Image (cartoon, grey):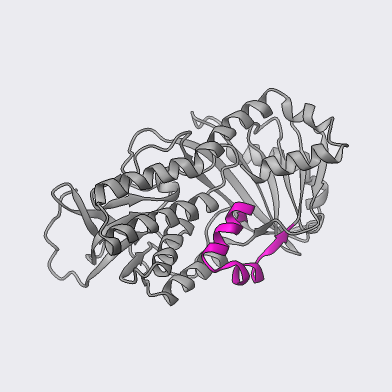
Amino acid sequence: MREQPRPAGSSTVVHAEVGIIGAGPAGLATAVRLGQLGVDRVVLVDRLDFPRDKTCGSAISPKGCAALAELGLSEVVARESYAISGLRLVTPLGHDVLVSSPQDVALICSRRTLDHLLLQRAQAMGTVFLGNFEVSFLLQRGDRVVGCRSSDGREVRVDYTVVANGAHTRFACERGPRRLIQAIMGWWEDVPFRSHHVEMIFDESVAPYYGWLFPETPGRVNIGICYEDPGLARNARQLFEDFLTKHYRERLAAAHQVGTWKGHPISYAPTITRLTSPGRIVVGEAGRITHPATAEGIYQGMRSGMLAAQALHSILKQRADPTRTLLEYERACRKAFAASFRGASLWRRFVSSGGLDALVGMLNRPMSRRLLARCMAQM
């Protein structure tokens, strides 16, 4: 949309070098990394204020933990998280295997907590946060994005705009048909589970995707399923209810449900396409950078945000050529995620063809268990 005159009575116009739309892990990691690199004129907007809840499984993978370490947030996030050192995996034919590690390898941290900790880190490094800022449209001068305007008339005018507002974004460069993974989940207290272990259940009803149990605290878990439904023909609530009955009926009998079930789509693409245009750079799920097999998005969002920050630093502080540098950002994202995304396609075929059940037959061998754990950690 072309730049339009501000309506009469509209309020503040904020100027900065970088404006970020969306305060999830992708946008927040961009802000934190910019601060680390010395870019301190950054404005971050979100349609909600903080702290706020976000429907998400809240698992931070080993790669996600490494990204947090680079952002200087390992210790503060770990203190507010539940540590994970093992996995219970159930195959489509019902074979059950347990893989454990002597050390913690992942974290479960509710998005209400994780996003707030990231925001506090970004603000400490100079980012200005504007909550309750519902972006109506991007501001443009010719073909260049120069900021955004909220539904109440506020404007953020910047040199570069980072689009990080997730699956439902209207502001990404790539606007073609989306591929979606559907998810529905709920929360329970007093559910028995093996301490410091997550559960991934590749039930036939959702395979090649899976259901999960992720412990958020010693007394509270989130349980959910993710599945594909291109024609939106399946009843999500009935599918989830059948899954819970099949796998968790006894364990939920004396449990207390917290809140209601919540569903959300996860947008992904098997390959990374266009992520930039003049003045605009797209990160995280807004750019469909989520894992096609696991539906993980926290690590991918943070890593793409960090790569975007590096590109913006090169342009703003080192006077690098903008066109070339933005293209280098796209190439850096492909390099960072291409192998993992190709592996996702192989994993989906592996699960669908019965390979996961065949592999479990060998998992009484320690080497096979380590191989499975290493494979899933690298996805």
On screen, residue 26 above or below 367: below
Could you tell whether 192 is left or right of 132 in the image?
right
Quarter where residue 37 is shown: bottom left
Q: Position of residue 166 (x, y in %)?
A: 43, 50
On screen, residue 327 above or below 229: below
Could you tell whether 153 is left or right of 109 in the image?
left
Q: Nearer the viewer, residue 79 or 62?
A: 62
Residue at point 87%, 37% (across, down): 365
Q: Nearer the viewer, residue 282 or 193?
A: 282
Q: Position of residue 301 (x, y in %)?
A: 48, 52
Residue at point 40%, 69% (across, down): 35
Residue at point 41%, 60% (across, down): 30
Q: Position of residue 369 (x, y in %)?
A: 80, 40
Q: Quadrant location of the C terminus?
A: top right
Could you tell whether 289 is left or right of 5 in the image?
right
Could you tell whether 189 is left or right of 281 in the image?
right
Let me know if residue 61 appears in the view: no
Residue at point 12%, 67% (across, down): 8
Let me know if residue 36 appears in the view: yes
Q: Nearer the viewer, residue 327 or 179?
A: 327
Quarter where residue 9 is shown: bottom left
User: Residue most toward the right?
Assistant: 364
Q: Position of residue 190 (x, y in %)?
A: 78, 61
What residue range appears in magenta?
Answer: 58-84
Residue 118 lies within the magenta run: no
Q: Nearer the viewer, residue 110 or 337?
A: 337
Residue 76 lies within the magenta run: yes
